[in-house]
Amino acid sequence: MVKTGGLADVSAALPAALSELPDEEIDIRVGTVAYRGVDNLPGFSLTKTFVAQTPAGALTIRIFEGRLGKGNVPVYAVDPEGFFDRHGLYGEDGGEYSDNLERFSLWNHALLHLPGVVGYSPDIIHANDWQTALSIPLFPHVIRPKIQAKPHRSVISIHNMAFQGVYPLSQWHWTGLPPAYNSFDGLEFHGRLSLLKGGVQFADLVTTVSPGYREEVLSEPGGCGLSGALRHRQDRFVGLLNGIDDREWDPASDPFLPVHFSGSDPTPKDLLKERMRKEWGFSPGERRPMFGVVSRMAHQKGLDLLAETLLTMGEKGDLGGEWIVLGSGDPNLEGLWRTIQALFPDQIHLRIGFDEPLAHRIIGAADFLVVPSVYEPCGLTQMYAMRYGTLPVVNPTGGLRDTVADGKTGIWMEELSENGIRKAIFKARTLFLEGHEIKEMRTRAMAVDSSWKNRAREYIRVYRRLMETPPWHNPLE
Ligand code: ADP
Ligand code: GLC
Protein backbone atom coordinates (compact mmCIF):
# COMPACT_ATOMS: atom_id res chain seq x y z
CA MET A 1 0.00 0.00 0.00
CA VAL A 2 1.02 3.59 -0.53
CA LYS A 3 0.82 5.64 2.63
CA THR A 4 0.87 9.30 3.54
CA GLY A 5 -1.66 9.10 6.37
CA GLY A 6 -4.64 7.28 7.80
CA LEU A 7 -6.50 6.80 4.52
CA ALA A 8 -3.92 4.17 3.59
CA ASP A 9 -4.41 2.33 6.89
CA VAL A 10 -8.17 2.31 6.41
CA SER A 11 -8.24 1.32 2.76
CA ALA A 12 -6.10 -1.71 3.55
CA ALA A 13 -7.56 -2.72 6.90
CA LEU A 14 -11.30 -2.36 6.22
CA PRO A 15 -11.44 -4.62 3.14
CA ALA A 16 -9.20 -7.15 4.89
CA ALA A 17 -11.47 -7.13 7.95
CA LEU A 18 -14.62 -7.42 5.83
CA SER A 19 -13.23 -10.42 4.02
CA GLU A 20 -12.29 -12.10 7.30
CA LEU A 21 -15.64 -11.81 9.09
CA PRO A 22 -16.27 -15.43 10.00
CA ASP A 23 -19.96 -15.63 9.13
CA GLU A 24 -20.05 -13.39 6.06
CA GLU A 25 -19.25 -14.19 2.47
CA ILE A 26 -18.46 -11.05 0.60
CA ASP A 27 -16.45 -10.76 -2.56
CA ILE A 28 -14.44 -7.55 -2.23
CA ARG A 29 -12.01 -6.14 -4.73
CA VAL A 30 -9.82 -3.12 -4.11
CA GLY A 31 -8.83 -0.71 -6.86
CA THR A 32 -5.84 1.50 -6.19
CA VAL A 33 -3.27 3.60 -8.00
CA ALA A 34 -0.23 2.03 -9.62
CA TYR A 35 2.25 4.46 -8.13
CA ARG A 36 5.93 4.27 -9.01
CA GLY A 37 7.53 1.04 -7.85
CA VAL A 38 4.40 -1.09 -8.00
CA ASP A 39 6.12 -3.44 -10.46
CA ASN A 40 8.71 -4.25 -7.78
CA LEU A 41 6.26 -4.75 -4.93
CA PRO A 42 6.43 -8.28 -3.60
CA GLY A 43 3.28 -10.16 -4.54
CA PHE A 44 2.26 -7.75 -7.30
CA SER A 45 2.46 -8.64 -10.96
CA LEU A 46 1.19 -7.29 -14.24
CA THR A 47 -1.92 -9.32 -15.03
CA LYS A 48 -3.81 -7.38 -17.69
CA THR A 49 -3.32 -4.73 -20.31
CA PHE A 50 -6.23 -3.19 -22.16
CA VAL A 51 -7.20 -0.08 -24.07
CA ALA A 52 -9.92 2.22 -22.71
CA GLN A 53 -11.61 5.27 -24.14
CA THR A 54 -11.00 8.25 -21.84
CA PRO A 55 -11.21 12.05 -22.09
CA ALA A 56 -7.59 11.86 -23.30
CA GLY A 57 -8.57 9.45 -26.10
CA ALA A 58 -7.66 5.77 -26.19
CA LEU A 59 -5.26 4.93 -23.35
CA THR A 60 -3.38 1.75 -22.60
CA ILE A 61 -4.22 0.66 -19.08
CA ARG A 62 -2.08 -1.79 -17.14
CA ILE A 63 -3.34 -3.68 -14.12
CA PHE A 64 -0.96 -5.00 -11.48
CA GLU A 65 -2.63 -7.52 -9.24
CA GLY A 66 -1.78 -8.42 -5.66
CA ARG A 67 -3.53 -9.77 -2.57
CA LEU A 68 -4.43 -8.28 0.78
CA GLY A 69 -4.92 -9.84 4.21
CA LYS A 70 -5.71 -13.37 5.23
CA GLY A 71 -8.83 -13.32 3.08
CA ASN A 72 -6.66 -12.81 -0.02
CA VAL A 73 -8.63 -9.81 -1.22
CA PRO A 74 -7.63 -9.02 -4.81
CA VAL A 75 -6.01 -5.59 -5.14
CA TYR A 76 -5.79 -4.04 -8.58
CA ALA A 77 -3.24 -1.29 -8.98
CA VAL A 78 -4.35 0.55 -12.09
CA ASP A 79 -1.89 2.40 -14.29
CA PRO A 80 -3.25 4.72 -16.97
CA GLU A 81 -0.25 5.01 -19.27
CA GLY A 82 2.37 6.03 -16.75
CA PHE A 83 0.52 9.05 -15.32
CA PHE A 84 1.44 7.96 -11.80
CA ASP A 85 5.03 7.00 -12.42
CA ARG A 86 6.31 10.02 -10.53
CA HIS A 87 8.33 10.76 -7.44
CA GLY A 88 5.37 12.11 -5.39
CA LEU A 89 1.77 10.97 -5.00
CA TYR A 90 0.01 14.33 -5.38
CA GLY A 91 2.94 16.65 -5.94
CA GLU A 92 6.55 17.42 -5.13
CA ASP A 93 8.47 20.01 -3.07
CA GLY A 94 5.34 21.25 -1.32
CA GLY A 95 3.48 21.93 -4.62
CA GLU A 96 0.70 19.98 -6.37
CA TYR A 97 1.18 18.51 -9.84
CA SER A 98 -0.61 20.84 -12.26
CA ASP A 99 -2.28 17.94 -14.09
CA ASN A 100 -3.84 16.26 -11.04
CA LEU A 101 -7.40 16.56 -12.36
CA GLU A 102 -6.34 14.96 -15.63
CA ARG A 103 -4.39 12.12 -14.01
CA PHE A 104 -6.97 11.28 -11.35
CA SER A 105 -9.82 11.54 -13.83
CA LEU A 106 -8.11 9.20 -16.27
CA TRP A 107 -7.44 6.82 -13.40
CA ASN A 108 -11.15 6.93 -12.39
CA HIS A 109 -12.12 6.14 -15.98
CA ALA A 110 -9.65 3.26 -16.02
CA LEU A 111 -10.95 2.01 -12.64
CA LEU A 112 -14.50 1.87 -13.93
CA HIS A 113 -13.41 -0.50 -16.68
CA LEU A 114 -11.95 -2.86 -14.10
CA PRO A 115 -15.13 -4.88 -13.42
CA GLY A 116 -15.57 -5.59 -17.13
CA VAL A 117 -11.93 -6.48 -17.61
CA VAL A 118 -11.62 -8.80 -14.61
CA GLY A 119 -15.16 -10.22 -14.95
CA TYR A 120 -16.75 -8.85 -11.79
CA SER A 121 -20.15 -7.24 -11.40
CA PRO A 122 -20.22 -5.36 -8.08
CA ASP A 123 -23.39 -4.70 -6.10
CA ILE A 124 -21.74 -1.73 -4.44
CA ILE A 125 -18.92 0.53 -5.45
CA HIS A 126 -17.33 2.23 -2.47
CA ALA A 127 -15.25 5.33 -3.18
CA ASN A 128 -12.98 7.17 -0.75
CA ASP A 129 -12.35 10.92 -0.73
CA TRP A 130 -11.84 13.20 -3.71
CA GLN A 131 -9.44 10.82 -5.41
CA THR A 132 -12.22 8.37 -6.36
CA ALA A 133 -15.23 10.67 -6.00
CA LEU A 134 -15.52 11.20 -9.74
CA SER A 135 -16.23 7.51 -10.27
CA ILE A 136 -19.61 7.96 -8.54
CA PRO A 137 -21.31 10.28 -11.06
CA LEU A 138 -19.26 8.74 -13.86
CA PHE A 139 -20.22 5.13 -13.17
CA PRO A 140 -23.59 5.04 -14.97
CA HIS A 141 -22.12 6.79 -17.99
CA VAL A 142 -19.06 4.64 -18.43
CA ILE A 143 -20.17 1.26 -17.19
CA ARG A 144 -23.83 0.50 -16.86
CA PRO A 145 -24.76 0.58 -20.48
CA LYS A 146 -21.98 -1.89 -21.19
CA ILE A 147 -21.56 -4.55 -18.57
CA GLN A 148 -23.47 -3.90 -15.40
CA ALA A 149 -26.46 -6.23 -15.58
CA LYS A 150 -27.95 -5.48 -12.17
CA PRO A 151 -28.54 -2.12 -10.51
CA HIS A 152 -25.61 -1.11 -8.35
CA ARG A 153 -25.34 1.12 -5.30
CA SER A 154 -22.58 3.57 -4.57
CA VAL A 155 -21.00 4.81 -1.36
CA ILE A 156 -18.59 7.66 -0.83
CA SER A 157 -16.60 7.84 2.39
CA ILE A 158 -15.23 11.21 3.39
CA HIS A 159 -12.00 11.12 5.38
CA ASN A 160 -11.30 14.84 5.35
CA MET A 161 -13.54 17.65 4.07
CA ALA A 162 -10.57 19.96 3.62
CA PHE A 163 -9.36 18.00 0.59
CA GLN A 164 -12.01 18.10 -2.12
CA GLY A 165 -10.23 18.00 -5.44
CA VAL A 166 -11.25 21.52 -6.51
CA TYR A 167 -10.16 22.62 -10.01
CA PRO A 168 -10.89 25.45 -12.45
CA LEU A 169 -13.90 24.93 -14.71
CA SER A 170 -11.58 25.49 -17.67
CA GLN A 171 -10.38 21.93 -16.97
CA TRP A 172 -13.92 20.52 -16.98
CA HIS A 173 -13.29 18.48 -20.15
CA TRP A 174 -11.03 16.13 -18.20
CA THR A 175 -13.94 14.85 -16.11
CA GLY A 176 -15.59 13.16 -19.08
CA LEU A 177 -19.01 13.91 -17.55
CA PRO A 178 -21.93 15.20 -19.63
CA PRO A 179 -22.21 19.03 -19.51
CA ALA A 180 -25.36 18.83 -17.32
CA TYR A 181 -23.09 17.99 -14.39
CA ASN A 182 -21.41 21.36 -14.75
CA SER A 183 -24.10 22.98 -12.62
CA PHE A 184 -25.02 23.72 -9.01
CA ASP A 185 -26.84 20.38 -8.84
CA GLY A 186 -23.71 18.72 -10.12
CA LEU A 187 -20.05 19.40 -9.41
CA GLU A 188 -20.02 23.19 -9.74
CA PHE A 189 -18.55 24.77 -6.60
CA HIS A 190 -18.20 28.55 -6.37
CA GLY A 191 -17.22 28.95 -10.01
CA ARG A 192 -14.94 25.90 -9.91
CA LEU A 193 -15.55 22.17 -9.86
CA SER A 194 -15.33 19.97 -6.79
CA LEU A 195 -14.82 16.26 -7.28
CA LEU A 196 -15.91 15.52 -3.72
CA LYS A 197 -19.15 17.43 -4.29
CA GLY A 198 -19.84 15.09 -7.20
CA GLY A 199 -19.50 12.14 -4.84
CA VAL A 200 -21.74 13.75 -2.21
CA GLN A 201 -24.44 14.67 -4.73
CA PHE A 202 -24.71 11.35 -6.54
CA ALA A 203 -23.72 8.57 -4.15
CA ASP A 204 -26.52 6.43 -2.76
CA LEU A 205 -24.91 6.78 0.63
CA VAL A 206 -22.40 9.20 2.09
CA THR A 207 -20.33 8.16 5.09
CA THR A 208 -17.67 9.81 7.15
CA VAL A 209 -15.28 8.36 9.67
CA SER A 210 -16.84 9.27 13.02
CA PRO A 211 -20.26 10.34 14.28
CA GLY A 212 -18.71 13.45 15.85
CA TYR A 213 -17.17 14.63 12.58
CA ARG A 214 -20.48 13.99 10.79
CA GLU A 215 -22.13 16.55 13.06
CA GLU A 216 -19.30 19.05 12.58
CA VAL A 217 -19.41 19.00 8.78
CA LEU A 218 -23.14 19.64 8.60
CA SER A 219 -22.39 23.30 9.27
CA GLU A 220 -19.60 25.71 8.46
CA PRO A 221 -16.68 26.05 8.82
CA GLY A 222 -16.47 22.26 9.35
CA GLY A 223 -18.14 21.50 6.02
CA CYS A 224 -15.49 23.44 4.08
CA GLY A 225 -18.22 24.85 1.83
CA LEU A 226 -20.07 21.56 1.35
CA SER A 227 -22.25 21.62 4.48
CA GLY A 228 -25.29 22.61 2.40
CA ALA A 229 -24.78 19.69 0.02
CA LEU A 230 -24.34 17.38 3.00
CA ARG A 231 -27.45 18.66 4.76
CA HIS A 232 -29.33 17.93 1.55
CA ARG A 233 -28.17 14.30 1.92
CA GLN A 234 -28.59 14.23 5.69
CA ASP A 235 -30.79 11.14 5.86
CA ARG A 236 -28.34 9.20 3.73
CA PHE A 237 -25.25 10.39 5.55
CA VAL A 238 -23.80 8.36 8.41
CA GLY A 239 -20.74 8.58 10.65
CA LEU A 240 -19.01 5.22 11.11
CA LEU A 241 -15.97 5.04 13.34
CA ASN A 242 -12.75 3.78 11.87
CA GLY A 243 -11.09 0.82 13.49
CA ILE A 244 -7.51 -0.30 13.84
CA ASP A 245 -5.66 -3.25 12.43
CA ASP A 246 -5.04 -5.08 15.68
CA ARG A 247 -2.52 -7.46 14.14
CA GLU A 248 -0.32 -4.71 12.79
CA TRP A 249 -0.74 -2.72 16.01
CA ASP A 250 -0.33 -5.32 18.72
CA PRO A 251 2.10 -4.60 21.59
CA ALA A 252 2.40 -8.32 22.26
CA SER A 253 3.90 -9.11 18.85
CA ASP A 254 4.84 -5.81 17.17
CA PRO A 255 8.02 -6.60 15.19
CA PHE A 256 9.20 -3.01 15.54
CA LEU A 257 9.35 -3.21 19.35
CA PRO A 258 12.40 -4.66 21.11
CA VAL A 259 10.25 -5.47 24.18
CA HIS A 260 6.69 -6.80 24.15
CA PHE A 261 3.80 -6.40 26.56
CA SER A 262 0.04 -6.72 26.72
CA GLY A 263 -3.00 -5.80 28.79
CA SER A 264 -2.51 -8.86 30.95
CA ASP A 265 1.26 -8.30 31.26
CA PRO A 266 1.82 -4.52 31.04
CA THR A 267 5.02 -4.24 33.14
CA PRO A 268 7.51 -4.66 30.26
CA LYS A 269 6.22 -1.34 28.88
CA ASP A 270 8.46 0.39 31.45
CA LEU A 271 11.41 -1.59 30.19
CA LEU A 272 10.61 -0.57 26.64
CA LYS A 273 10.51 3.07 27.69
CA GLU A 274 13.92 2.75 29.34
CA ARG A 275 15.40 1.07 26.26
CA MET A 276 14.03 3.74 23.97
CA ARG A 277 15.05 6.62 26.29
CA LYS A 278 18.61 5.43 26.00
CA GLU A 279 18.37 5.05 22.24
CA TRP A 280 16.89 8.54 21.90
CA GLY A 281 19.63 10.06 24.03
CA PHE A 282 17.69 11.14 27.14
CA SER A 283 19.80 11.27 30.23
CA PRO A 284 19.38 8.37 32.64
CA GLY A 285 17.95 8.68 36.10
CA GLU A 286 15.13 11.09 36.78
CA ARG A 287 11.59 9.74 36.48
CA ARG A 288 9.83 11.95 33.95
CA PRO A 289 6.79 11.43 31.77
CA MET A 290 7.44 10.86 28.10
CA PHE A 291 5.21 12.65 25.61
CA GLY A 292 5.06 11.30 22.06
CA VAL A 293 3.88 12.96 18.84
CA VAL A 294 3.41 11.02 15.58
CA SER A 295 1.77 13.16 12.99
CA ARG A 296 1.66 14.81 9.64
CA MET A 297 3.12 18.28 10.17
CA ALA A 298 0.07 20.23 9.14
CA HIS A 299 -2.03 22.99 10.65
CA GLN A 300 -4.88 20.46 11.01
CA LYS A 301 -2.83 18.59 13.57
CA GLY A 302 -2.30 21.62 15.82
CA LEU A 303 1.45 21.19 15.75
CA ASP A 304 2.04 24.92 15.33
CA LEU A 305 0.14 25.67 18.55
CA LEU A 306 1.87 22.82 20.37
CA ALA A 307 5.25 24.18 19.23
CA GLU A 308 4.33 27.69 20.44
CA THR A 309 3.21 26.26 23.77
CA LEU A 310 6.47 24.40 24.25
CA LEU A 311 8.42 27.54 23.35
CA THR A 312 6.57 29.47 26.06
CA MET A 313 6.97 26.66 28.58
CA GLY A 314 10.64 26.48 27.66
CA GLU A 315 11.12 30.05 28.90
CA LYS A 316 10.86 28.55 32.37
CA GLY A 317 13.12 25.72 31.29
CA ASP A 318 10.55 22.95 31.76
CA LEU A 319 8.66 21.21 28.96
CA GLY A 320 6.73 19.04 31.40
CA GLY A 321 8.66 15.91 30.53
CA GLU A 322 10.59 14.34 27.69
CA TRP A 323 9.31 14.75 24.15
CA ILE A 324 9.77 12.38 21.26
CA VAL A 325 8.39 13.89 18.08
CA LEU A 326 8.06 12.31 14.62
CA GLY A 327 6.47 14.14 11.73
CA SER A 328 6.84 15.50 8.25
CA GLY A 329 4.95 17.80 5.94
CA ASP A 330 4.75 21.58 6.01
CA PRO A 331 8.34 22.91 5.69
CA ASN A 332 7.59 25.90 7.98
CA LEU A 333 6.37 23.61 10.73
CA GLU A 334 9.30 21.29 10.27
CA GLY A 335 11.55 24.35 10.68
CA LEU A 336 9.72 25.47 13.81
CA TRP A 337 10.20 22.06 15.42
CA ARG A 338 13.88 22.03 14.45
CA THR A 339 14.22 25.35 16.27
CA ILE A 340 12.64 23.94 19.42
CA GLN A 341 14.80 20.87 19.28
CA ALA A 342 17.89 23.08 19.02
CA LEU A 343 16.74 25.13 22.03
CA PHE A 344 15.93 22.15 24.25
CA PRO A 345 18.09 19.29 23.01
CA ASP A 346 17.93 17.38 26.30
CA GLN A 347 14.13 17.53 26.48
CA ILE A 348 13.15 16.86 22.85
CA HIS A 349 14.21 14.17 20.45
CA LEU A 350 12.95 15.09 17.00
CA ARG A 351 12.83 13.10 13.80
CA ILE A 352 11.57 14.80 10.66
CA GLY A 353 10.47 12.20 8.15
CA PHE A 354 8.05 9.35 7.57
CA ASP A 355 9.26 6.40 9.58
CA GLU A 356 6.89 3.54 10.31
CA PRO A 357 9.11 1.57 12.71
CA LEU A 358 9.76 4.72 14.74
CA ALA A 359 6.01 5.49 14.81
CA HIS A 360 5.45 2.09 16.44
CA ARG A 361 8.27 2.60 18.92
CA ILE A 362 7.06 6.03 20.00
CA ILE A 363 3.49 4.82 20.40
CA GLY A 364 4.80 1.84 22.35
CA ALA A 365 7.30 3.59 24.61
CA ALA A 366 5.72 6.95 25.46
CA ASP A 367 3.48 7.52 28.49
CA PHE A 368 1.25 9.93 26.59
CA LEU A 369 0.54 10.62 22.92
CA VAL A 370 -0.30 14.27 22.32
CA VAL A 371 -2.88 14.96 19.60
CA PRO A 372 -3.88 18.65 19.66
CA SER A 373 -5.76 18.56 16.33
CA VAL A 374 -7.75 21.61 15.25
CA TYR A 375 -10.19 19.16 13.71
CA GLU A 376 -9.94 15.39 13.33
CA PRO A 377 -12.31 13.35 11.15
CA CYS A 378 -11.38 10.21 13.07
CA GLY A 379 -7.70 9.91 13.90
CA LEU A 380 -6.02 6.56 14.25
CA THR A 381 -2.94 7.26 16.35
CA GLN A 382 -4.97 7.83 19.53
CA MET A 383 -6.52 4.37 19.09
CA TYR A 384 -3.13 2.76 18.45
CA ALA A 385 -1.84 4.55 21.55
CA MET A 386 -4.63 3.23 23.79
CA ARG A 387 -3.90 -0.31 22.66
CA TYR A 388 -0.28 0.24 23.74
CA GLY A 389 -1.26 1.67 27.13
CA THR A 390 -0.11 5.13 26.04
CA LEU A 391 -2.71 7.64 27.13
CA PRO A 392 -3.84 10.07 24.44
CA VAL A 393 -3.90 13.76 25.39
CA VAL A 394 -6.30 15.20 22.84
CA ASN A 395 -8.29 18.19 21.76
CA PRO A 396 -11.75 16.59 21.91
CA THR A 397 -12.92 17.21 18.37
CA GLY A 398 -14.47 14.83 15.80
CA GLY A 399 -13.24 11.28 16.19
CA LEU A 400 -10.93 12.18 19.07
CA ARG A 401 -13.97 13.02 21.19
CA ASP A 402 -15.71 9.82 20.08
CA THR A 403 -12.80 7.51 20.87
CA VAL A 404 -11.05 8.94 23.95
CA ALA A 405 -12.91 9.06 27.28
CA ASP A 406 -11.69 11.98 29.40
CA GLY A 407 -10.15 10.87 32.68
CA LYS A 408 -10.77 7.22 31.83
CA THR A 409 -8.73 6.29 28.76
CA GLY A 410 -7.03 9.62 28.11
CA ILE A 411 -7.08 13.35 28.77
CA TRP A 412 -9.12 16.04 27.04
CA MET A 413 -7.68 19.53 26.66
CA GLU A 414 -10.09 22.08 28.12
CA GLU A 415 -9.61 24.23 25.05
CA LEU A 416 -7.33 24.36 22.06
CA SER A 417 -5.04 27.18 23.14
CA GLU A 418 -1.57 27.46 24.63
CA ASN A 419 -3.19 27.52 28.04
CA GLY A 420 -5.38 24.49 27.28
CA ILE A 421 -2.43 22.47 26.01
CA ARG A 422 -0.18 23.45 28.91
CA LYS A 423 -2.81 22.54 31.48
CA ALA A 424 -3.35 19.15 29.85
CA ILE A 425 0.39 18.47 29.82
CA PHE A 426 0.64 19.28 33.52
CA LYS A 427 -2.41 17.17 34.28
CA ALA A 428 -0.71 14.30 32.50
CA ARG A 429 2.50 14.90 34.42
CA THR A 430 0.67 14.85 37.75
CA LEU A 431 -1.04 11.61 36.79
CA PHE A 432 2.31 10.14 35.89
CA LEU A 433 4.04 11.23 39.09
CA GLU A 434 1.22 10.09 41.35
CA GLY A 435 1.29 6.75 39.62
CA HIS A 436 -1.86 5.08 40.91
CA GLU A 437 -4.65 6.41 38.70
CA ILE A 438 -2.52 6.24 35.57
CA LYS A 439 -2.20 2.50 36.01
CA GLU A 440 -5.96 2.10 36.07
CA MET A 441 -6.35 4.36 33.07
CA ARG A 442 -3.75 2.36 31.16
CA THR A 443 -5.49 -0.88 31.92
CA ARG A 444 -8.78 0.61 30.79
CA ALA A 445 -7.26 2.06 27.61
CA MET A 446 -5.64 -1.24 26.70
CA ALA A 447 -8.95 -3.01 27.15
CA VAL A 448 -10.77 -0.76 24.65
CA ASP A 449 -11.57 -2.78 21.55
CA SER A 450 -11.16 -0.49 18.54
CA SER A 451 -10.50 -3.33 16.15
CA TRP A 452 -11.91 -3.43 12.66
CA LYS A 453 -13.33 -6.83 13.50
CA ASN A 454 -16.17 -5.08 15.30
CA ARG A 455 -16.37 -1.97 13.26
CA ALA A 456 -16.41 -3.78 9.91
CA ARG A 457 -19.75 -5.25 11.00
CA GLU A 458 -21.21 -1.76 10.99
CA TYR A 459 -20.26 -1.46 7.35
CA ILE A 460 -21.94 -4.78 6.60
CA ARG A 461 -25.14 -3.55 8.25
CA VAL A 462 -24.98 -0.36 6.24
CA TYR A 463 -24.27 -2.19 2.96
CA ARG A 464 -27.24 -4.49 3.62
CA ARG A 465 -29.59 -1.63 4.33
CA LEU A 466 -28.32 0.08 1.21
CA MET A 467 -29.11 -2.90 -1.01
CA GLU A 468 -32.64 -2.96 0.42
CA THR A 469 -33.20 0.75 -0.28
CA PRO A 470 -34.06 1.98 -3.78
CA PRO A 471 -31.14 3.72 -5.50
CA TRP A 472 -30.85 7.44 -4.98
CA HIS A 473 -28.69 8.37 -7.91
CA ASN A 474 -30.34 9.92 -10.85
CA PRO A 475 -27.87 10.30 -13.67
CA LEU A 476 -28.03 13.67 -15.45
CA GLU A 477 -28.05 13.58 -19.23
P1 ADP B 1 -4.15 11.54 9.17
O1 ADP B 1 -4.66 10.49 8.25
O2 ADP B 1 -5.00 12.76 9.23
O3 ADP B 1 -2.72 11.87 8.94
P2 ADP B 1 -4.53 9.48 11.24
O4 ADP B 1 -4.32 9.53 12.70
O5 ADP B 1 -5.83 8.99 10.75
O6 ADP B 1 -4.23 10.95 10.68
O7 ADP B 1 -3.46 8.54 10.55
C1 ADP B 1 -2.11 8.82 10.52
C2 ADP B 1 -1.35 7.56 10.16
O8 ADP B 1 -0.10 7.94 9.61
C3 ADP B 1 -1.05 6.69 11.35
O9 ADP B 1 -0.91 5.35 10.93
C4 ADP B 1 0.30 7.24 11.83
O10 ADP B 1 1.04 6.29 12.56
C5 ADP B 1 0.94 7.52 10.50
N1 ADP B 1 1.94 8.59 10.51
C6 ADP B 1 1.73 9.93 10.56
N2 ADP B 1 2.88 10.60 10.48
C7 ADP B 1 3.86 9.68 10.39
C8 ADP B 1 5.28 9.73 10.28
N3 ADP B 1 5.92 10.90 10.22
N4 ADP B 1 5.96 8.57 10.20
C9 ADP B 1 5.30 7.39 10.24
N5 ADP B 1 3.98 7.26 10.34
C10 ADP B 1 3.25 8.39 10.41
C1 GLC C 1 -7.95 11.47 7.24
C2 GLC C 1 -8.26 12.18 8.56
C3 GLC C 1 -8.07 11.29 9.78
C4 GLC C 1 -8.65 9.92 9.56
C5 GLC C 1 -8.09 9.31 8.29
C6 GLC C 1 -8.65 7.92 8.00
O1 GLC C 1 -6.62 11.50 6.92
O2 GLC C 1 -7.47 13.35 8.69
O3 GLC C 1 -8.69 11.91 10.89
O4 GLC C 1 -8.37 9.09 10.65
O5 GLC C 1 -8.42 10.13 7.20
O6 GLC C 1 -10.06 7.94 7.91
Image: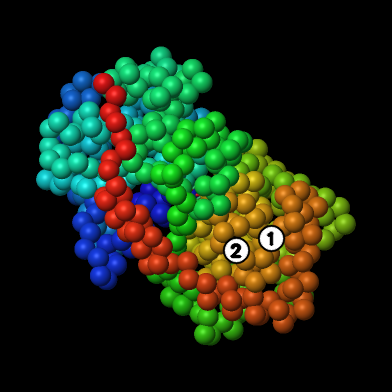
Residue sitting nearer the eye, 347 or 427: 427
Residue at (38%, 60%) from the top-left corner?
458
Side of 53 where 14 appears, left or right = right
Q: Is residue 411 visible?
A: yes
Tell me the amino acid under the disc marked 1: Trp
Q: Secondary structure at mark 1?
A: strand
Q: Is residue 366 visible?
A: no
- Which quadrant holds residue 334? top right
Residue at (15%, 42%) from the top-left corner?
150
On residue 376, which mark appears? none
- The spot of residue 4 in percent (x, y) is 46, 47
Q: Is mark 2 within 8 Å of ligand 1?
A: no
Q: CA distance from mark 1 to mark 2?
A: 8 Å
Q: In this figure, which residue is indicated by the disc labeled 1? A: 412
Q: Is residue 382 above or below residue 176?
A: below
Residue at (72%, 82%) from the top-left corner?
436
On residue 404, which mark appears? 2
Neighbour class for label 1 at 10 Å: few (<14), some, many (≥20)? many
Which quadrant holds the C terminus? top left
- The spot of residue 178 in percent (x, y) is 28, 20
- The residue at the far top in this view is 170
Neighbour class for label 2 at 10 Å: few (<14), some, many (≥20)? many
Side of 414 where 200 appears, left or right = left
Q: Secondary structure at mark 2?
A: loop
